Image (tube, rainbow, N blue to C red):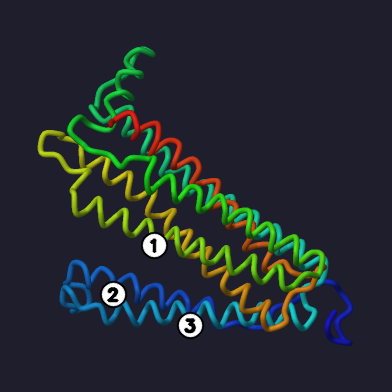
Amino acid sequence: MAHGAVKHDYHILPPSPWPLVGSVAATVMALGLIGWLKGGVLGIEKGNWAIFAAGFAGILYTFFGWWSDVAKEAKAGDHTPVVSIGLRYGMILFIASEVMFFVAWFWMFFEMALFHEHRTLSSIEEVRTAWAAWPPAGVETVSPWHLPLINTLTLLLSGTTVTWAHHALQVGDRKGAKWGLILTILLGALFTAIQVYEYAHINHEQLFYSEAAVNSGLYGSTFFLATGFHGFHVFVGTLFLLVCLIRLMNGAFTPKQHFGFEAAAWYWHFVDVVWLFLFAFIYVIFGASAH
């Protein structure tokens, strides 16, 4: 609809290099990571992170180029109401796939809690006994009422600030939207910093390792996979919001057309909800009882 010759509401995309560039960069980064950590891949010596860095730089370049193209499409008027519906469906399906991604980690954590002794549970009482024995005896867990609680409050507060920013944008208050986004980004960075400090503390104190607990490795693996992937999603969400802030400060988004920001807000709320489940089950139900 941005061009006079277009007679329909759909946007036909021109050939784009970004899927191919992104795939090549991701492959290089994956091989570089394996070589960096293990060595022996494509002649990469263990400890050499140069190939990984090159792949990562390629992914960042893909992000910048692809997002820039989408922003230009929106500015050119290519995101008609019909196209916007398709974008919303795509974001909804993406978040649904992310939900199932975290369901897999929760499933693994609960399965380890029930079957860490590799035996068949034939009664409710045996199920309760198995759950009560998780984490394994001798494993010191992280107290949920210190850093995890602070991070919970941090994410909940960030949920209110991103909602404030969204509402401000809807009513044309660009200054309020800007400050709401800045606060949300700072809170997201604070969450990441606290989690890095928490991981360093766990590693230094070797909280999840016990020679007396045969299955201590299972608990540590499931803990770090679930909380670590969530932390990565917080980092990605923070970058998502940062891009929205840069676009907002450059004059993008209107009260009626701001799906790029709306998608970021949806993603951020999804991250908030996942953390509430992680905090409730991994830290409180299977953590606080162990102290």
Which circle marks residue 116 in the picture?
A: none
The residue closer to the viewer here, 153 or 36, is 153
- Give the class, few, some or many, for how many residues have Cα within 10 Å of label 2's Cα (few <14, many ≥20): many
Residue flagged by tag 3: what amino acid is it? Tyr
Q: Earlier in the sequence, mark 3 or mark 1?
A: 3
- Give the class, few, some or many, for how many residues have Cα within 10 Å of label 3's Cα (few <14, many ≥20): some
Spatial CA span between label 3 and label 1: 25 Å
Q: Which residue is mark 1?
A: 193
Q: Secondary structure at mark 3?
A: helix
Q: Which residue is mark 3?
A: 61
User: Which label sits in the foreground, 1 or 2?
Assistant: 1
Q: Which residue is mark 2?
A: 32
Residue found 64% across the figure and 82% down from its top: 69
Residue found 53% across the figure and 76% down from its top: 19
Spatial CA span between label 2 and label 3: 17 Å
Residue flagged by tag 2: what amino acid is it? Gly
Answer yes or no: do the residues labelled 3 and 1 have beta carbons within 8 Å? Answer: no
Q: Residue furthest bottom?
A: 4
Residue flagged by tag 1: what amino acid is it? Ala
Say above or below: 113 vs 66.
above
Residue 163's image quarter?
Answer: bottom right
Q: Secondary structure at mark 1?
A: helix
